[in-house]
Image (tube, coloured by chain):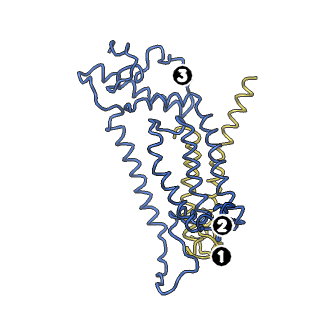
Amino acid sequence: MADDNENTETRTDGSGPGIVAPDDEVPTWRERKERTQGLSRLTYEYFERSRREDQDLRQESSYVERDVLGFPTWPHELIRNLSLTSFFVGMILFLSATLPPEMMAVADPSTTPEIILPDWYLYWSFGLLKLGPLNPELSILGGEKLMADRTYGVVANIVVVGFIAIVPFLNKGSARRPVEQPFWGAVGVGGVVFAITISALAIKNLLPLDTHLLFDITFLAPIVATLISYAVLKSMREGYMFDLNRRYYRLRPPK
Amino acid sequence: MADEFAKGFGILTSAGLIWMVLAGWFNTPTFEAKEYPQLLAPDPANPDTYTAIALELKDGLFWFAILGALTFWVVIPVGRELYAAYASE
């Protein structure tokens, strides 16, 4: 172990300075007693206990080289997963026993509904078909539009789907939490908000809102959400809990 | 329960869950009505004893969910801040 401590590289077997805190980083008992806030104290004690168990295991056993970093599956992961599973299964049973939904009337295949809409999770695509006001009337064509509004909507679908498809190739960073990369986290928030607003645009004739105002909100709200979430994520990169979590997330395997 | 947020959140969710079930029993004549939303229909007229008890319980749980969460999220933290501020003087 002494050899590993002189190595500055975090190693996959859990040794090295990035995993177990060096002696000068380990808080004194006075510092531990001062951390009396409920959740942070609990979290701190949990990680400290895990760190200590990890250290003891590595010092006591001959099983030095470990391939996988992290907490043991049993009991840490399994107890957590089993309790979460039990909770949700119990909630499903409870709700289905207490609040059974009524049986709807059978759909009539011989009549067409007044308003035809796709399922709600496809509203965003339906909304992209309604971008007619964004289709420019080009003066070079004598005020004509380059393509019809419906063609423009289809092209907008291709652009958006194409952008989503290249997102995994844009950034392959190792960040696991939005605070670690505020810019990309904010871009993601903007995308989610745009999905919601463009879905609202798809059902604009059902919403109690002026159509032009809704159209403006559709494109302004994502920008506002992006800026706000960027500021919030930037300001979250401070404090004790961020450092504590960063230490935990350094346990992940290297890229 | 580790901290005040979890206590308030537990009160909000568990009381809200029971409130939702009772409102589904007594204040949701149909899921498809246009004139009033689910869970928020007016109370049934001439309730029998058990229904009246359940309606009272539902009302109490609603305010327990709101006030209980606010107590743990606002009142107790503010009280502690005030106590600490006065104690430090």
Could you tell me which chain the residue with mark 1 belongs to?
A: B
The answer to which of marks 3 and 2 sits earlier in the sequence is 3
Q: Amino acid at mark 1?
A: Glu
Q: Is residue A34 left or right of residue A50?
A: right
Measured as percent of width and height from the top left, residue A239 is found at 58, 28
Residue B35 shows which numbered tag?
1
Measured as percent of width and height from the top left, residue A6 is found at 38, 13
Marks 3 and 2 sit apart, C-alpha to C-alpha, by: 74 Å
Residues at discs 2 and 1 both on one chain: no
Residue corresponding to mark 2:
A144
Residues at discs 1 and 3 both on one chain: no
Q: Colour of chain A?
A: blue
Dot 2 falls on a residue whose secondary structure is strand
Residue corresponding to mark 3:
A33
Residues at discs 3 and 2 both on one chain: yes
Q: Amino acid at mark 3?
A: Lys
Residue in the picture at 66% in, 66% down: A144
Where, quadrant-wise, is the C terminus of chain A in this rendering? top left
Q: Colour of chain B?
A: yellow
Tell me if residue A252 comes above or below residue B35 in the rendering.
above
Measured as percent of width and height from the top left, residue A219 is found at 65, 55
Marks 1 and 3 sit apart, C-alpha to C-alpha, by: 59 Å
Could you tell me which chain the residue with mark 2 belongs to?
A: A
Tell me if residue A181 comes above or below residue A99 in the rendering.
above
Q: Point out the frontmost of discs 2 and 1.
A: 2
Give the crowd class for mark 3: few <14, some 14-19, many >=20 residues within 10 Å: few
State the residue in front, A227 or A139: A139
